[in-house]
Amino acid sequence: MQLGIIGMGKMGLPLALNGRDKGLNIVVFTDKADKRAQLKQEGITVHAGLESFVSALTPPRAVWLMIPAGPPVDAMIARLRPLMAPGDILIDGGNSRYQDSQRRSEELRRDGIHFLDVGTSGGTEGARNGACLMVGGDEAVYGRMEPVFRALSGGSGYGRMGASGAGHFVKMIHNGIEYGMMQAIAEGLEILRHGPMPFALDRVTQVWRKGSIVSGLLMDMTAAALAREPDLGSIKGVVAASGEANWTVEEAVRLGVSAPVIATSLFSRFKSQDQEKYAEKSLAAMRREFGGHAVIAKGED
């Protein structure tokens, strides 16, 4: 089965290689010369022009977008829309907001173009060897593309979540859960690091990843990172917060659902980016004022 892919970043490129290895006829568009050279070496058909890319696909076409959420997706759809035909399928495999996916599905339907939103999980390793795919969209269109989802997932980690927007809604909640799980692992390691005995955290995580209740992909990745650098000395403790967890918390508020773990993990990421730590300075100043407690001046240890 043929699949066109646009977006050769950290997820798109391994996804293309995964599809190639699983027997799909992968055709790629990218305007990056280095990626084109790499793909040609891998034996994948690649185009530098969008028109030639679409023309190379056999109707009804299937085009998978693996690009950043938001305006870039709308911009690419605007370029593709006049080149595609009724019956073609456009797939958004990025982390778009589910309301955007619902809107895009409705807009494309007017041209007879089908739209599927696919939440893609598993990181770069999953994209390369078997991703988790959460699909939203029309059931019949999903059925047409199921061989592609089966191939890219490795045969099991895929499914239709519901109508348009459902795939990205489920992925949004997935990422919120991921934030909470990551925060819990990080906090546990921090307690161990300050514990009454000199724990080797790389050894601890290696043990935890084999048969424990907290084993899993996140623990595997943590253990791999600590095996390379047990003290994580080269890493600054600033953690980015992507849109999905923000949207998860917003949705929880909108629905009146309590989600304190996800919310706290999100706020912890916000705090990690605070270089000045003004709130902590304010607390120190208050303690000095009401109790005469000493403060540590800037530049002191």
Image (cartoon, rainbow, N blue to C red):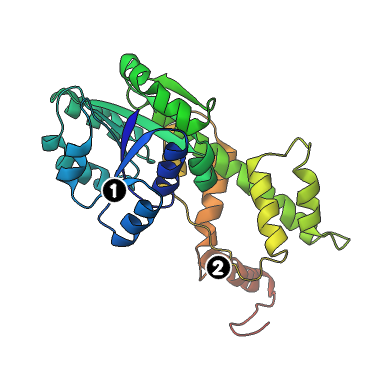
Q: Position of residue 64 (x, y in %)?
A: 32, 37
Report which quarter residue 168 is drawn in: top left
- Compared to residue 47, the image places residue 140 above or below, namely above
Q: Which element carries disc 2, helix, strand or loop?
A: helix
Which residue is at a point 33% across and 22% down the rendered structure image? 137
Q: Which element carries disc 1, helix, strand or loop?
A: strand
- Compared to residue 160, the image places residue 262 above or below, namely below
Report which quarter residue 125 is drawn in: top right
Answer yes or no: do the residues labelled 1 and 2 have beta carbons within 8 Å? no
Viewer-nearest residue: 104 or 173: 104
Q: Is residue 209 left or right of residue 172?
A: right
Instruction: Look at the image and tell me whether residue 248 can be seen.
Output: no
- Compared to residue 125, the image places residue 236 above or below, namely below
> Which residue position is annotated with label 1?
46
- Compared to residue 107, the image places residue 203 above or below, namely below
Which residue is at a point 51% across and 69% down the rendered structure image? 275
Disc 2 packing (10 Å; few <14; some 14–19; many ≥20): few
Residue found farthest to the top: 140
Residue type at mark 1: give it.
Answer: Val
Q: Is residue 206 left or right of residue 64?
A: right
Disc 1 versus disc 2: distance between alpha carbons? 56 Å
Residue found farthest to the bottom: 299
Instruction: Look at the image and tell me whether residue 226 can be seen.
Output: yes
Viewer-nearest residue: 28 or 159: 28
Q: Which mark is residue 282?
A: 2
Q: Position of residue 262 (x, y in %)?
A: 55, 40
Q: Position of residue 222 (x, y in %)?
A: 67, 52
Q: Earlier in the sequence, mark 1 or mark 2?
A: 1
